[in-house]
Amino acid sequence: MTGVELAPAEIQVLQDLTILVFAPFVSGAIAHVEARVQGRRGPRILQPYYDIAKLFRKETLVPEDASFVFLVAPIVAFVCYLTVPLLIPVLTSYPLPLGYMGDILGGGFILALAGFAVALAAAETDAPYAQLGSSRAMTFGALVEPSILFVTFTVALLTATDLPYFEAAAVRPLGQAVHPAHILAAFAFFLVVLADTGRIPVETHSSTLEFGMIDEARTLEHSGPAFALLKWGAAMKQMVLYVILINVFVAPWGLAGSRQLGSVLLAIPIFLAKALGLGIVFAVIDNSFSKLRLFKITEFMAAAFLLAVLAVLVLYLGGR
Amino acid sequence: MHGLSAAASAPSAVTGAAETVAILVLLSEFAMLRAALSRSQVRLYAFQSLAVAALAFIVAAERHIGELYVLGGLSVLLKVLIVPAIIYRVLREAPDDVATSHRFGVASMVLLAIVLSGFGIFVVGTMPIHSKLLPVLALAVAAAVILVAFLLVIVRSDVVSQAVGFFSLENGVSLASFVLAAGLPLIAEVAFLFDLLVAVVVFGVLMRVHHGRSASLSTRPLERLRG
């Protein structure tokens, strides 16, 4: 096939653009599916785009006591969410040059920096709910960390590196994908994603009740373009986590194997289809479980931790 | 990457199945530890027993041991159907489902159980019993199951948990025996099952007597009586 070959740098820009452009679409599609499962008609699939466009036209209000951090934080978070896609296999199965810039832990640090910036902005306001949200988000974020660490250990033991590209390559042959350690780690990471995207056992992402909020409450005081960036950023974070879950752990198939323009572009709809499949799973979970009480969330985290630790133990003995 | 070539030369279907079943059994043991309702504990026990019986069938098919089919059938009958049914009946007569009989918070119990199962797995891992035919991992997980079952008996203060913990202890032992000595004479394994049957009867009587005396399935009243 003689097609246009893309330079690695172009592919990396394309990865970022994929996340940037399609993240609200994935969010909207999931919200739509969720409504359908509940028997509602639901918002339009493109609704998040309209929301973001509307917010960009609105004015920004800043709480009296807030400093510049309040306005800078959304931008920092947004840039962080744009950086992570450079490190993970969004479209290609082979590592791109910047993919060596950081491993899974590096990506985790950048995601954590984004979370930290948003929490800091929330703490800047004198609003009780925003501060409550930021303190909760930090607490539960710290509880999720051990599971992520042990998932990383599993990856490291399986592939002798902790680069996401190599884990995906190790999973690709089906024989390895059904390895018990890998299944345990993937499931643990699934629970982590569930917690990090504010899904139902941990948080009701569409609720307006402040007392149950964790991540959502942090952005209550923001308005205008800053809020638009935060919303967009949340959608991008969700998509980044989906990329890691799908393209690294669960189904690293259908990625572009060459630098041909056609195959790279084809990888985008394939990934969107996989993300929607995952989104449907999340929507079904949303509808079949109830939200955990706040003090029971530790049990959920403990379950994720258990699976991740078992994965490492299994690898220690399984030795494969 | 090194993992790949090794996975391709994975010993046999039995090893893979044994490992998967062992992990399922261990996970259901953890689930029993944290389950709030006695009924769900019983259901989990039935599931765990089913997994062990499935392993019996797999080993029987792979190694052509006819007796194991009989044993698997017997354990499905006994551990998946009869024992849960008996406990369910006791529970029906004692409808006050013990909601929280945890002595610690669930998260700390799970952490404790993780430490214990890690201990079990590492101890078996360091034992010099490595052989090509022996799925060491499944054996190690069986040890972990046994330790966690002990923990279940210790940290939950209601009669049903203690009975279920004891029964699942037997599941861990039979898991180990299928892995270690699949051809263990039928008579010995049937003796295990018979032991279990006796234990069920004894526990059934105990539960009923205890409930009759203290009008509750919790064992806390027993502690209060002391001294």
Image (spheres, coloured by chain):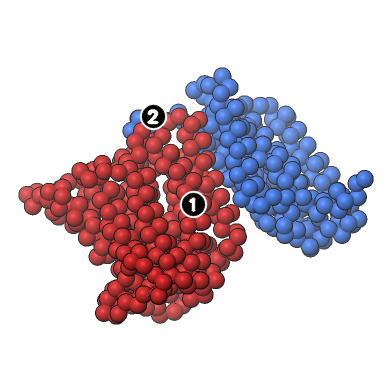
| Pick the front one: A80 or A179 | A80
Dividing the image into 4 quarters, which one contains the C terminus of chain A? Answer: top left
Farthest residue in the top direction? B128
Residue drawn where x is 60% and y is 27% of the image: B123
Chain letter, disc 1 residue = A
Chain B shade in the render = blue
Query: Is there a contact, CB below 8 Å, between mark 2 and mark 1?
Result: no
In the image, taking residue A112 as reference, residue B175 lies left or right, namely right
Q: Which mark is residue A229?
A: none
Crowd band around label 1 with a 10 angstrom C-alpha radius: few (<14), some (14–19), many (20+)? few
Residue A214: image x %, image y %? 49, 65
Chain letter, disc 2 residue = B
Residue drawn where x is 12% and y is 50% of the image: A6
Residue hosting label 2? B6
Residue A28: image x %, image y %? 34, 71
Q: Which mark is residue A142?
A: 1
Q: Is residue A27 visible?
A: no
| Pick the front one: A142 or A91 | A142
| Up/down of A289 relative to B86, above or below | below
Farthest residue in the right direction? B227
Residue drawn where x is 36% and y is 57% of the image: A114
| Up/down of A164 relative to B141, above or below | below
In the image, taking residue B63 as reference, residue B88 lies left or right, namely right
Q: What amino acid type should be assigned to the residue bearing mark 2?
A: Ala
* Residue depth check, mark 2 versus mark 1: number of the one nearer the observer: 1
Residue B207: image x %, image y %? 83, 51
The quadrant in which residue B172 appears is top right
Q: What amino acid type should be assigned to the residue bearing mark 1?
A: Ala
Crowd band around label 2 with a 10 angstrom C-alpha radius: few (<14), some (14–19), many (20+)? few
Chain A shade in the render = red
